[in-house]
Amino acid sequence: LEAYVGAEALLERWRESGGHWTSTDEEGALAELLADPAAGELLDETAEFLGAGIADLVNLFNPERIVVGGWAGLLLGPRLLSPVRQAAAAYALRHPFAQTTIELGRLGPDAVTVGAATLPLARFLAEGGAAITSREPIADGAS
């Protein structure tokens, strides 16, 4: 899915369709893509791809919630979330899709980093605040 809807792939498809950007980083380039009125068809296609991928997840795993996150997801989300939901509804089985919500992450673009930072803290608290003396991996004691 990343090969079709990831930031790098989306920018490459935009470049191939005649789009160009002046920004030197992907985030700025993606913001320029969003501002380009000629990129509407590309964004609609991207929403369809993402919606189809999400529909596969719904059909296979029947999740209650799918959260779109990361810096690119949060940047594109306000423009793409509604068409992604429509595409997912079109491709997913009706009953599982009715039980699933698709929404934007609320923890910001650094949610994964913040989540990973909680592992040592969880271990510390699980040990009662005592110094950790073993050499076990942190993840082993955090569950």
Image: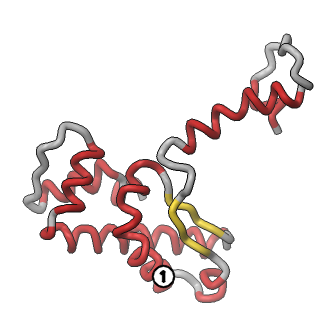
Q: Which residue is drawn at 80% across and 34% down?
A: 142
Residue occupying the far top of the picture:
133
Q: Is residue 40 left or right of residue 54?
A: left
What percent of the width, then of the height, locates residue 103?
Answer: 53, 67
Q: Nearer the viewer, residue 25 or 3?
A: 25
In the rendered view, would you say 13 is above or below 142? below
Q: What color scheme is it?
A: secondary structure
Left or right of 13 in this view: 69: right
Q: Does 16 appear above or below 124?
A: below
Q: Please name whichever residue, 25 or 52, is drawn nearer the observer in this view of the structure.
A: 25
Graded by Cα atoms within 10 Å as few (under 14), some (14 to 19) or many (20 or more), the crowding at tag 1 reads some
Q: In this view, does 138 lie to the left or right of 23?
A: right
Q: Estimate the x, y position of residue 45 in percent, counting from the top left.
A: 29, 72
Q: Position of residue 2 (x, y in %)?
A: 40, 54
Give the residue displayed 46% in from the left and 49% down from the top: 70
> Which image quadrant: the C terminus?
top right
Instruction: Find residue 116 and report its image quarter.
Output: top right
Query: Which residue is outermost to the bottom?
Result: 94
Looking at the rendered structure, the kind of residue marked 1 is Tyr
Q: What residue is at 22 percent from the left and 48 percent from the top?
A: 29
How many marks are shown on the rendered structure? 1
Would you place residue 35 above or below residue 91 in this image? Answer: above
State which quadrant residue 100 falls in. bottom right
Residue holding disc 1: 91
The x and y percentages for residue 65 are 63, 68
Residue at x 41% of width, y 48% of height: 71
- Quadrant where the N terminus is found in the figure: bottom left
Query: Considering depth in this image, is 31 or 140 the residue closer to the camera?
Result: 31
Judged from this view, the residue extending furthest toward the left is 18
Q: What kind of element bears circle 1?
A: helix
